[in-house]
Image (spheres, rainbow, N blue to C red):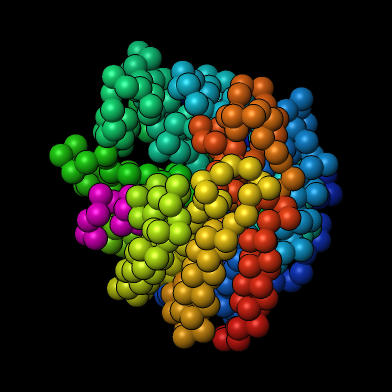
Amino acid sequence: MNPTIDRRLLLGSAVLLAGCATMRGGDAAHRQFVRRDGMRLMTGDRRYRFVGANMWYAAYLGADAAYGNRARLIRELDALAALGVTNLRILASAEEGPLHHSIKPGFRTATTVNDALLGGLDFALAEMAKRNIRAVLYLTNFWEWSGGMMTYLSYVNGGRYIDVDDPAHPWPAFANFNAQFYGNDRAVGLYHDWVRALVTRSNGVTGIRYADDPTIMAWQLANEPRPAGDLAHAAPPQFHAWVQGTARLIKSLDPHHLVSTGSEGLMGALGQPEIVLAEHAIAEVDYLTAHIWPNNWEWVRQADLPGTHARGEALSQEYIDQHVGFARQLNKPLVIEEFGYPRDGGSNDPAMSTQYKDRFYRLIYAAVERDMAHGGPTAGTNFWAWNGEARAQHADFKFQPGDLQYMGDPPHEPQGWYGIFAGDTTTRIVADHAAAVARLPAPR
């Protein structure tokens, strides 16, 4: 344990506002924790189902700092609530370090903490509670855009790292290097310091301990943790030991909340069903997660969506069916917590149409509605991601240091590539799905 950072984290987390011990708004169901009962998520004696989004940047907008924009955060939350979105998946850590494409500022460095970003997360959770929107908070990242595991390794190995797009270290060198994290006690120790501090933090706006706040649905170990980049470099027992050790740590600090992995599912498990099943069979892991990326996985070609979309749709349906099967085998719920698709022609311009993206969203939502209607394990979805009113600040759609138009497309990706902008026709599909889910019976 690093005593300097641990002490600062805990001191920064200890602020309590007198007289704010209860939720400021929200209905009775929202004031109950989400819990697991076999393949079902529940609030009280009612089944909990949700339509969600990814909004990694919520704490950045919520920060009382030059890079924050609380007025915009409030507008975005209002827009999402109006669509029927009741769940947001949010970045709750970013490790500041040497990686070229990682967002700055971070929540932490090797020895310091960004109290403004923690305050931004406090503010975001307080505003979400007012709108009956729950949060899934992920605690680090396998990928470079928020620092993540590679940055933790650089903190303890003398500053060595690989950038994901370094031509001297082509894929899968980045992912294989990253896999060293799971067996590095010092790197995992720093990460666990962060987990302890955040899980035991008290919200400076509401005064509620995070561990006691039902606005949080789940803690998530990481965004898309993979055992390695290829099987030759994977050590599944070590990877699973990290999953179990971290999940047990969280449960020891906070028995009220769910814990999930953040896994892509089969694609993030090197195509090995046994890795997926072992990772999610761990008792402290409450539900299975799956991500679906047809363009990234070369199921479609964004330059030829008319000619490739049918194949992508067939493979996406197959992937959903596989993970519904895994969830049934594990007797645990399933959340499809990332899915994304490019705009027509592969454009990043919000003026471009979204005919094929809309088809993809309809496919995902129809599969979810069918499974929910038949009492299956699918509990909800989080589309990737909400761009809202943001617009790219540069003609090449690249994010530059100092840009403040945060959107769902993170800083290493073209701005506008996958996210949904306010006004997109895709928003109507989200709203229609939310209405359909709301009409489903909520069996006890």
Residue 99 on image: x %, y %: 45, 22
Residue at 45%, 59% in the rendered image: 306
Stretch in magenta = 261-274
Q: Is residue 394 above or below residue 47?
A: above
Left or right: 161, with 349 as reference point = left
Q: Quadrant of the C terminus?
A: bottom right
Pick the front one: 118 or 165: 165
Q: Quadrant of the N terminus?
A: top left
Pick the front one: 224 or 192: 224
* Magenta-span inclusion, residue 266: yes
Pick the front one: 360 or 279: 360
Residue at 22%, 56% in the rendered image: 272
Residue 335 can be seen, yes or no: yes
Residue 320 can be seen, yes or no: no
To which quarter of the image does residue 71 belong?
top right
Residue lying farthest top?
158
Residue 318 on image: x %, y %: 34, 69
Residue 334 on image: x %, y %: 44, 67
Q: Is residue 260 above or below residue 13?
A: below
Pick the front one: 36 or 169: 169
Left or right: 399, with 428 as reference point = left
To which quarter of the image does residue 144 belong?
top left
Residue 233 on image: x %, y %: 19, 37
The total number of labels drawn is: 0
* Magenta-span inclusion, residue 120: no
Left or right: 33, with 290 as reference point = right
Residue lying farthest left?
232
Residue at 45%, 49% in the rendered image: 302
